[in-house]
Image (cartoon, rainbow, N blue to C red):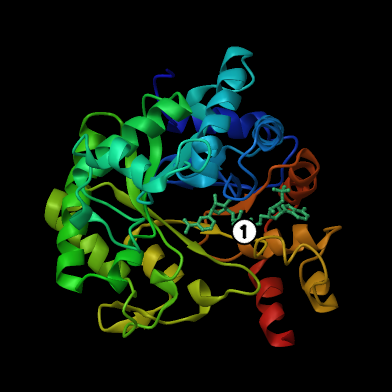
Amino acid sequence: MSTSWATTEGTARYRQRFAHLVAPGHFRQERGLWFSSIGLGTYLGGYDDETDARYREAILRAVELGCNVIDTAINYRFQRSERSIGQALRVLFEKGRAARDELIIATKGGYIPFDGAPPIDTAQYMKETFFDPGIITPADLAGGGWHCMTPAYLEHQLERSRENLGLECIDIYYLHNPEQQLGEIPRAAFTERLRAAFEFLEAKVREGKIRMYGVATWNGFRQSPKAPDYLSLRDLIDLARDIAGIDHHFRVIQLPYNLGMLEALGKRNQPYDGEMLSTLEAAARLGIIVMTSASLLQSQLARGLPAFVSECLSGLDTDAQRAIQFVRSTPGVTTALVGMSQVSHVEENLKTARVPPAPLEDFLKLFQKR
Ligand SMILES: NC(=O)c1ccc[n+]([C@@H]2O[C@H](COP(=O)([O-])OP(=O)(O)OC[C@H]3O[C@@H](n4cnc5c(N)ncnc54)[C@H](OP(=O)(O)O)[C@@H]3O)[C@@H](O)[C@H]2O)c1
């Protein structure tokens, strides 16, 4: 197991190593760490050895090209994504190609993961893995029986993630799509579940098993406040403050954002001191790091963008690069996560890092031309 975690000194060292290769503005400092503006995501792909091998190679190449943020979740590809990252990290550390304190590794817990492949008998798998050992009781489940965020379950999942990743300490641990539970349980019960989860996560920070936590969401921050699965960032932070005071460790959120999903920037759905702000604005006011998912709308934005996008976001060769440039140039976004299991995609996408983020006036022109 690798001890240590991403540090100010380590991430600054990493940034310095790439000073000749990437443009100013590619690395951003938040909470003392230098984050690359493009991060590698590991959601999509088959659950087979070949995809594992492709992800390992993609990660090695990404770290070699100035990407020090890697995002996963225990359920991605039935734990294979976490394990592939763990294998790639071992190579990086053993060969001295990167040090643990240079890389920011994020994972998520909440969904019930299979173990490498779907079981033949799902009910039997649930019974043997979770119910019989007392990790979950059926009443803990929501999201159609696939979501759980009790401390006992998160304890089990965090230990498994640490083992899969080969890391003593995970830099960012997210509750994965917690809003999934709101379709089934009342909001008051949801808040109590969140409270217990945040208390657990604060305890894990004290134990040195994670460094910070937050929520990774799909719908929650994009909905209107009246929607059943809406999340208020202010309420979440107030809950963390209530538990741990101003030095709480709820420091990061994740939500989808791209040229086709603009709510994080444009939807004023977050109450803040009598105003309604966008999620990006609210996060900035609250000092919360924002990681955006689905930068390419799961590859749909990698080709066929209208010509005005390349007029506004110049200096790039491909639509994938322009779509990534849009996300990383958005005020308030720390890291644009891009799913990449192919070295050719890593090389194409990381070329975007050689261009500075678009100036605000060019970025705003995109909206005037639409
Ligand atoms: N709720 C959540 O917490 C949540 C939800 C969704 C995503 N995420 C995170 O955010 C990350 C990014 O989102 P995503 O993976 O769903 O979608 P994405 O980044 O929008 O798209 C990933 C897809 O685009 C392809 N791609 C990458 N570069 C390309 C290029 N230059 N040309 C053509 N295709 C390209 C990838 O193919 P290859 O794999 O073949 O390279 C992959 O199929 C995820 O991997 C995950 O870590 C979190």
Residue 324 visible in the snapshot: yes
- The answer to whether residue 71 shows anywhere in this view is no
Q: Is residue 298 above or below residue 84?
A: below
**Quadrant housing residue 17:** top right
Element type where label 1 sits in the image: helix
Q: Which residue is mark 1?
A: 328
Residue 73 vs residue 370, the one in the foreground: 73
Residue 147 percent location from the top left of the image: 33, 56
Depth check: give the residue in front, 275 or 260: 260
Which quadrant of the figure shows ligand 1? bottom right
Residue drawn 73% across and 45% down? 350
- Position above or below: 170 against 153: above
- Image vertical order of residue 192 relative to residue 151, above or below: below
Identify the residue at image location x=67%, y=72%.
Answer: 363
User: Which quarter of the picture shows residue 323?
Assistant: bottom right
The amino acid marked with disc number 1 is Arg
Q: Is residue 325 above or below residue 187?
A: above
In which quadrant is the C terminus drawn? bottom right
Residue 342, image x, y percentages: 75, 42
Front residue of 92 and 359: 92
Q: Is residue 316 left or right of residue 219?
A: right
Q: Residue at x 61, y 19 (%)?
A: 91
- Place of residue 66 in the rendered image (x, y in percent of width and height, measured from the top left): 66, 37
Q: Tell whether 117 sits left or right of 208.
A: right
Q: Is residue 72 left or right of residue 369?
A: left
Question: Where does residue 230 sit, x and y in percent of width and height?
Answer: 34, 75
| Corner quadrant of residue 217 | bottom left
* Quadrant where the image shows the N terminus: top left
